[in-house]
């Protein structure tokens, strides 16, 4: 479970429409998890913020495949994030290894860092990671 959450939370997100002004250029862009195994592109989708896996290391692809998610690249990892008054975003993160969705928040920690937090059981068990902005995909 920990590995699955790490993979899911470690992804970088993909662009999909017009992001609200508050999301640009802040949380919109391409991000990589702290393990360097998943990249996600974030952007607008239906007036909210979403993110899609745009690159994954072989290890992450294998773990996802073992859980029935193949291919991993292209999977929508972040869904329906809405801007909050405190500047954070609240939505849902998908954990491919578990095949489940969990409540989540994204908080920008400067122009090149996002703290992505996912919670189980009504917010009692949470895990967070700091993703770094990237300009290009690894090995690209």
Image (spheres, grey):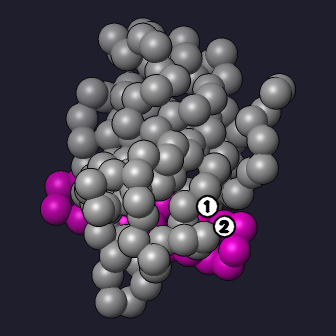
- Depicted 128 relative to depicted 72: above or below: below
On the image, numbered disc 2 is attached to which residue? 113
Q: Is residue 137 left or right of residue 26?
A: right
Residue in front for this viewpoint, 73 or 46: 46
Q: Does residue 118 appear anywhere in the picture? A: no
- Does the segment drawn in magenta span residue 58? no
Label 2, residues with CA under 10 Å away: few <14, some 14-19, many ≥20 = some
Quadrant for residue 101, please give it: top left
Q: Secondary structure at mark 2?
A: strand
Q: Position of residue 5 (x, y in %)?
A: 43, 41
Residue at 33% across / 40% down in the picture? 94
Q: Position of residue 12 (x, y in %)?
A: 57, 45
- Does the segment drawn in magenta span residue 116? yes
* Residue 130 circle label: 1
Disc on the earlier residue, 1 or 2: 2
Residue at 41% across / 60% down in the picture? 18
Residue in front for this viewpoint, 128 or 73: 73
For the record, the magenta segment spans 105-123
Q: Position of residue 9 (x, y in %)?
A: 48, 47
Q: Secondary structure at mark 1?
A: strand
- Disc 1/disc 2 C-alpha distance (Å): 6 Å
Q: Is residue 21 left or right of residue 102?
A: right
**Pointer 1 with pointer 2, Cβ within 8 A:** yes
Placement of the N terminus among the 4 image quadrants:
top left
- Depicted 42 relative to depicted 69: above or below: below
Residue at 74% across / 36% down in the picture? 137
């Amino acid at each position: 479970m920990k590995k699955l959450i790490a993979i899911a939370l470690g992804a970088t997100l993909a662009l999909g429409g017009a992001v609200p002004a508050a999301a640009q250029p802040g949380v919109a862009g391409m991000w990589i998890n702290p393990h360097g195994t998943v990249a996600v592109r974030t952007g607008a989708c239906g007036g909210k913020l979403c993110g899609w896996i745009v690159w994954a290391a072989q290890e992450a692809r294998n773990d996802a495949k073992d859980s029935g998610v193949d291919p991993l690249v292209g999977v929508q990892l972040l869904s329906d994030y809405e801007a909050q008054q405190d500047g954070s975003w609240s939505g849902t993160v998908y954990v491919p290894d578990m095949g489940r969705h969990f409540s989540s928040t994204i908080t920008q920690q400067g122009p090149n860092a996002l703290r992505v937090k996912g919670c189980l059981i009504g917010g009692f068990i949470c895990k967070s990671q700091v993703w770094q902005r990237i300009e290009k995909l690894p090995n690209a």
